[in-house]
Image: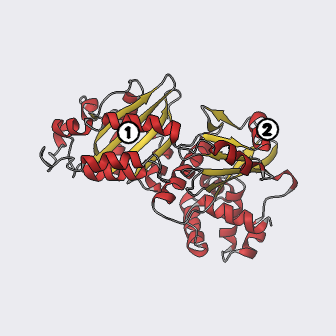
Amino acid sequence: MTSKAFHHGDNSGSFLSNETELIQCLYDSLEHQAGFHGFLSLLAGSVGGCAAQLSFIRRNPRAIEHMWHAGLSDEFLTWYLDNNMIEHDAVTNHAVTQEAGNFNSALPLLCDGPPGDEYERWESDQDMLDSAWLVVEASDSHITLLTVQRTYAQGAYQPEEIAAMNRLVPFIKQTVALAKKIHQHPEAAQTLSSIADLITDPALILNNRGTLVTANQRGKQLLDQEPCINLRHERLHFEVDTLQDSFFKAMARAATTVCTNGLAMPETLIIKRPGLSPLVMTIRPLEHNEILSGGVLVTIVDLKARALPKASEIAEYFPISAAEAKLCEGLVAGLSLKEIAEHRHKSELTVRSYLKQVFQKTGYNRQGQLISAILLTTLR
């Protein structure tokens, strides 16, 4: 792998010439509604990278529990999660064994060759060559990991470039630590608690770091009584891995929406429970204000008193075909595209084509947004 590396065109005199701007942007992240997204975008461009992430990673069992990112598409995140790439990611697998330190290149971790077929897919599918990685914080249970990737065309990180990036390390570590303490207004929890108490359904408010700020009484009761969803290290944890992945992507999209000034649309996840009615979880991005620097409002409704909409009902409200309405019925019931394909005796490729057509006809581009719109329309 190292034999393919190219030398980056920047020289030591020009590399990180905007160091002061980077540090200013880093500290601005403490008050910006997009959190660290702006800094990550500026950092990736400044060091000749294609993407950057600041990830909160559980050591064991290994999982990314929250992420700020720049330069990653939703398709990439889906690919990463669906293929369980964290199990094959050489940087993450090494970083979770480390304490906080300095930036390093990923290439030395691969000196004996790529660690298996899945990593080769990572290279061929995503064209990734190298990552500059930094363990920002480390505890017994988690690490905070900053990575900046480069493609083959961008070349490998050179020692002088890593040395220049390491001048930023003290500022990065301090800012991430400060974010835990001052990211919210001192009276935020009390004020947000009053707002949550006005909501009749179980409600939770999470900040843009993905941790719980407050919950109303019904929300607290649900977390205490419902085995399929609970709190772990002040973050929502689901027993079903696919649901955990869907929630992670929804949170990442909520933050990205703020960063790109996109329309903040709610997304809905269906939580299936064996022998019980499903729970409907809706995730609504919250705008930045003097109380909260971004985040989401999560409401959870038990549909035990109401039936989920059937295809015929859905077709009454949306300009879609009968087959596409059947697909929507399955999505609202909490089925995956693979499960819908099996139930409908169709290929998964056919079902995906149905979903693409539904997106085109309805104007939505996420499953969670589509489900949210269907439920809002049919359950009024």
Give the percent coordinates (x, y) of residue 332: 70, 58
Specify how the rendered protein is coloured: secondary structure
List the residue tagged with mark 1: 146
Tell me: 10 left or right of 54: left
Question: From the viewer's perspective, is residue 327 above or below residue 336?
Answer: below
Residue 220 falls in image quadrant: top right
Quarter holding the C terminus is bottom right
Assign a secondary structure to mark 1: strand
Relative to 217, 66 lies left or right: left
Which of 192/60 is in front?
Answer: 192
Residue 96 vertical placement versus 288 (above, below):
above
Q: Quadrant of residue 131?
A: top left
Q: Position of residue 11 (x, y in %)?
A: 12, 47
User: Residue flagged by tag 1: what amino acid is it?
Assistant: Leu
What distance separates the C-alpha of mark 2 from that of mark 1? 36 Å
Q: Residue at x 60, y 52 (%)?
A: 338
Q: Confirm whether residue 50 shows in the render.
A: no
In the rendered structure, are the residues bearing label 2 and label 1 in contact, judged by CB atoms less than 8 Å apart? no
Q: Earlier in the sequence, mark 2 or mark 1?
A: 1
Residue named by callout 2: 221
Q: What residue type is disc 2 on?
A: Gln
Residue 250, position as x, y percentages in the image: 57, 52
Furthest residue toward top: 140
Badge 2 marks a residue whose secondary structure is helix
- Relative to residue 70, is residue 257 drawn left or right? right
- On screen, 260 above or below 90? below
